[in-house]
Amino acid sequence: MRNLKFFIFGAALSALFSLSGLAQTATVPPNALGKIGLINVAAFGDEKTGINKYKTGIAQVNKALEPITNQIKSLSARYQTALNEYQTMQKASPAPSASVVGSKADEVQSLQTQITRAQEDGKAQYNKAYSDIMSPIVNDVIKALNEFAKAKGYAVILDGAKLEEANILWGFDDRYDVTKEFIASYNARAAAGVPPAVPTQ
């Protein structure tokens, strides 16, 4: 996903710089830069209408992370129980012995440390799983989107959702939102058995 966002952002910058340069030297004829399309990259993972291969990849990543995810959930539950017990001890009257309270405080601290380490392990496992599983899919989507843009006559295709979030895009004609069209095209391409595209270096 990061590579796809970089591609879209880079294309946007190129278009803006090109337009700026032309404006300083000559009047830009209508449609001189070609059509500009908009796409919602977040829709690729939509459960019902997204890219099938992309959704399958995400499911595989989540499956690979199940063990560490379950471990973190278990540790978090134990931590919350121990923390509640520790807080109850502090308010109890008569108060438990200092050794009992101190032992529970040590348990809380130990579980907190275990959770932090498990989260760090989970992040590393996620990065590896995403790289192994999703990177080839994302690269193929980038290649297909480039081919789609050329076939449909688009000079650039921008991530409209991200532009709206950044308050860069304030309005647009829905006819130039190619999200559904591209997803349908990509899914049909994959169903037809078209081999994954090899991104240009």
Image (tube, helix red, strand yellow):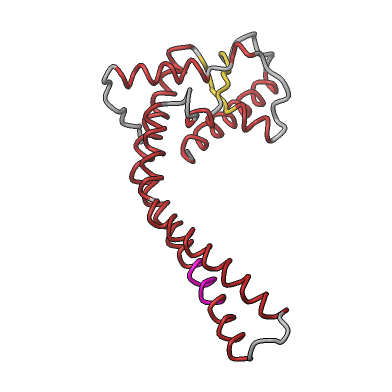
Instruction: Give coordinates of residue 155: x percent, y percent.
Output: 53, 18
Number of numbered discs present? 0
SS assignment for the magenta stretch, majority: helix
**Vertical order, 114 against 164 (above or below):** below
**Vertical order, 149 against 11 (above or below):** above
Q: Quadrant of residue 158?
A: top right
Q: Is residue 124 left or right of residue 169?
A: left
Going 56% across and 26% down the picture, which residue do you hit?
A: 40
**Vertical order, 60 against 91 (above or below):** above
The C terminus sits in image quarter: top left
Going 46% across and 18% down the picture, which residue do you hit?
A: 182
Q: Is residue 102 left or right of residue 58?
A: right
Q: Is residue 89 left or right of residue 146?
A: right
Magenta residues span 109-116
Q: Quadrant of residue 143?
A: top left
Going 57% across and 29% down the picture, which residue do you hit?
A: 14
Going 57% across and 72% down the picture, which residue do you hit?
A: 82
Residue reaching furthest top? 30
Q: Nearer the viewer, residue 50 or 163?
A: 50
Instruction: Give coordinates of residue 193: x percent, y percent.
Output: 26, 20
Q: Nearer the viewer, residue 185 or 11?
A: 185
| 111 in magenta | yes
| 201 in magenta | no
Residue reaching furthest front? 94
Q: Nearer the viewer, residue 176 or 127?
A: 127
Instruction: Give coordinates of residue 192: x percent, y percent.
Output: 28, 16
Q: Quadrant of residue 183?
A: top left
